[in-house]
Amino acid sequence: MDKLVEMKGIRKSFFGVEVLHGVDFEVAAGEVVALCGENGAGKSTLVKVLAGVHARDSGDVLLMGEKIGNSTPLEMQHKGVSMIHQELVLIEDMTAAQNIFLSREPCNKLGFIDFKKMNNDAKELLKSLGQDIKPTTMVRDLKIAQKQMIEIAKSISFDVKVIIMDEPTAVLTNKESEILFKLIKSLAERGIGIIYISHRLGEIKEIADRVTVLRDGNLVATKLLEDVTQKEIATLMVGREISDSVVAEFEGDESEIVIEVNNMSGDILRDISFSVAKGEIIGFSGLIGAGRSELMEMVFGLRKYDMGEVLLYGKQVKIKNARKAICANLGFATEDRKGTGLVQDRSISENIDFVYRVKNKGGFLMPKNVEARATEKIRDLRIVCTGATQFVKNLSGGNQQKVVLAKWLQSDPDIFIIDEPTRGIDVGARQEIYSIIKDLATRGKTIIVVSSDMTEVLSICQRVIVMHEGMITGVLTGDERTEENIMHHAINVM
């Protein structure tokens, strides 16, 4: 196969710290190459060098045999390299069609934008992705999964030769992921090279031809997928054996109900009731749009409900905002770490200390104390960074997720809601997060996990509540906890 991309000896540093140490990487025409590694291994940095987001310090990049210098993202797009970023980079106050064809809008004979053609082209493009999204819909009104599909449509709208996909299925349903996999195979058959970054080793085995593994900014191995198992890939990523997840045994007191929700209705939710005991880890599963996140937002006071009640330790409470929830010893790590989880232009220490200061009613800010608290959490959660003063926006996605968890753990909540706890987190760090969750439960904390990853909820949750279109359609315990039963209730098969 002809080589589309050759990267030789790529080096890149940030703030004096080298994160890529002479990495080699290549992609051939019609090939799907998976790029794997722990968070902070350098995956996103390497592909951002290729896409023109970062300028390399040294090394060569060849595109179809031609050596190219450092270029801008737009220049690289016009050269045929397009990237779908892990964090969405859409313009919220523009329509889906405007985002797809931004800076490339079709014009009529008079030189004005031909909105009819642009909308029709966007509609056909989205239809090819199995999406029934109106081109005139404002992006801010779309769900996260729909926004991801807009990113994909935008990427393939160019005359692409190489597409970089950074965690593209992180916010997609199983059905949407299947559509994406079919699209990837179709693109490869047309001779387009695909660079696929994912921590989901199962889907890598399904769609990729080769896998390249990075660890600590170094190239570890490049192997054919047919010659390596998922466990071997995981071992290459972390440099040690990875043990299989096991269900945490419930060590709490079933009679001591910490939080109880009765007959909650509002928005898409209809008559939701559940309770969680002290020391229990309970999971909420279901397809995107089932209402899981909306339910947690109501419990935490971020969204109003029309009917129902919330009881903490048997007493009814009215939690009207996040401050009241925090003071009631609730924590809520939301699914959108970029939008609602972190302040990107602030340091790690400032982000980690935010909830702590709210709970402790502010007070005089002692920078040494703030940094000391942050440094402790950086060590405990193994956050890869240059120090507590580093800006959050300069961290990898997985390390940003760890900062979100650190922020809430700093406030020591009794009830911790975690929405998509390991989205974008590598296999090694995933086990660390699971250990943290289990340890919290052992200490008597009540944990509510919302996750689209069925393996995840089955691995760490003693009970799994399944939702469909705003209703609870199943509560699974013991041997009932299977992927088949979760999917059965998620699509509400009667």
Image (tube, rainbow, N blue to C red):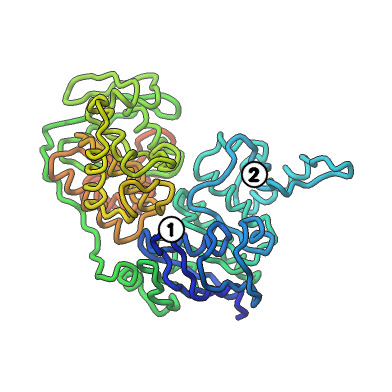
Residue 479 visible? The answer is no
Give the CA separation, mark 1 to mark 2: 30 Å
Q: Position of residue 128 (x, y in %)?
A: 64, 54
The amino acid type found where label 2 is placed reads Asn
Q: Give the left or right position of residue 421, taking residue 113 as reference.
A: left
Q: Which residue is mark 2?
A: 99
Name the one closer to the observer, 449 or 343.
Answer: 343
Q: Give the left or right position of residue 28, taking residue 451 as reference.
A: right
Quadrant where the N terminus sits is: bottom right
The amino acid type found where label 1 is placed reads Phe
Where residue 14 is drawn, which disc sits there? 1
Q: Is residue 82 above or below residue 485?
A: below
Q: Nearer the viewer, mark 1 or mark 2?
A: 1
Q: Position of residue 223 (x, y in %)?
A: 43, 78
Q: Categorize mark 1 by other alpha carbons within 10 Å: few (<14), some (14-19), many (20+).
A: few
Q: What SS does tag 2 mark?
A: helix
Name the one closer to the observer, 401 or 449.
Answer: 401
Q: Position of residue 361 (x, y in %)?
A: 25, 24
- Residue at image position (64%, 49%) is 126
Quadrant where the C terminus sits is: top left
- Residue at image position (24%, 63%) is 244
Q: What SS does tag 1 mark?
A: strand
Q: Position of residue 439 (x, y in %)?
A: 17, 48
